Amino acid sequence: MEINAIVAEFITTDNYNLTPITDGLINTTYLLEDKDQSRKFILQKINNHVFKQPEVIVNNHLLINEILRSNDYHFQIIEPVRSLANKLLVEDINGEPWRMLSFVENSVTFLTAPSLQTAFDAAKTFSYFLNTVNTEKLPAIEDSLPNFLNFEKRVADYKDSLKNAAPHLRENAKAEIEITNQLLSLPDHWIKMEKNNQIPKRIIHADVKISNILFDQKHNPLAVIDLDTMMISTILYDFGTMIQSYTNTTQEDDGTARNNFNPEMYKVVKEGFLFYLKEKLTPEESDHLDYAAQVAIYIQELRFLTDYLNGSTYYFITHPEHNLDRTKNQLELLKGLREYLGTS
């Protein structure tokens, strides 16, 4: 098995266990247990169709870790682990890159927030993380995902997918396409603010879903994980995707969900997000948090629908309608949020 050759690049024993971790949508991840040393690691194949320059995410990770350490950050820091040949990236026979990361013992993750308190603590943890990395001078973070937050391009890509989609896919998604088209102007103000430099550039995590925080057995936060998407953009995106992740009372791929927006969760997540960042945000940022939440959910819905219409080539799927189910779920979430905010 090819993966054994990758393991041999990092540890010197054949006495190990390898367990798939299936929560992620992009990379292929395993828990590697070196039984001789009684040590555990995260072994991961980086999806280089998504992350076309994997060395960028490794370099960014090292840079972010250095900022955290130099600012007395008090949560655990996930460290890259070098191979036996002192490399941070190892290629397999197909030229695909692998890396190893430190593992946090006795940690748990959640796909949805199990309680209001846990959601508040998670949002507060991201607030602290973002406040810590956003020092006075922006570091030389490279963009690991060019155009990831180019919402003009997201809308254009959706229009292209709609135009070129197989007729049966278009028909299957008819109701979702109609709602999506009605809301197509929702991101326009965001695009305008960015073009006019009305909102500051900051370091953002760009994937602040609750599953990217490790908790201990008592649900206390231990670490912020998955720094692959770290980039310089607007912090409004992190707040928006936090709401998109935390307020959903169902799994993201539940296409039958109804009334899946939790308004109490919205309140505590906003409170947690502002805990360390309130004094740092500009009035323009503070005034647009509710709007950012709507845009973030809409853009995620747009991405799921675009991928569905393109034949599901980006996100990992387990069945043909998986991305359509995700689309339906996000539209229901957005509907609930807009009703709560009085903008529907």
Image (cartoon, grey):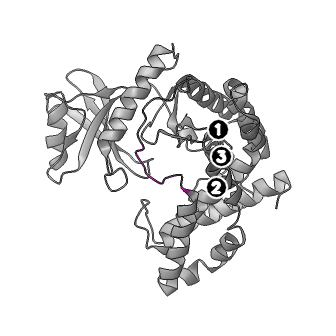
Query: In screen coordinates, is 202 left or right of 184?
Result: left
> What span is in magenta?
143-150
Q: Residue furthest front?
A: 196
- Which residue does the image show at 25% across and 42% down from the upper left? 98
Which x, y percent locates residue 106?
45, 25
- The residue pinned by badge 1 equals 114
The type of residue carrying mark 1 is Pro
Residue 152 highlighted magenta (yes or no) = no
Above or below, comparing residue 5 to residue 276 in the picture: below
The type of residue carrying mark 3 is Gly
Count up the numbered dots.
Answer: 3
Magenta stretch prevailing secondary structure: loop
- The residue pinned by badge 3 equals 240
Which x, y percent locates residue 218?
58, 24
Q: Secondary structure at mark 1?
A: loop
- The residue pinned by badge 2 equals 191
Residue 145 highlighted magenta (yes or no) = yes
Asked if residue 302 can be seen in this view, the reply is yes
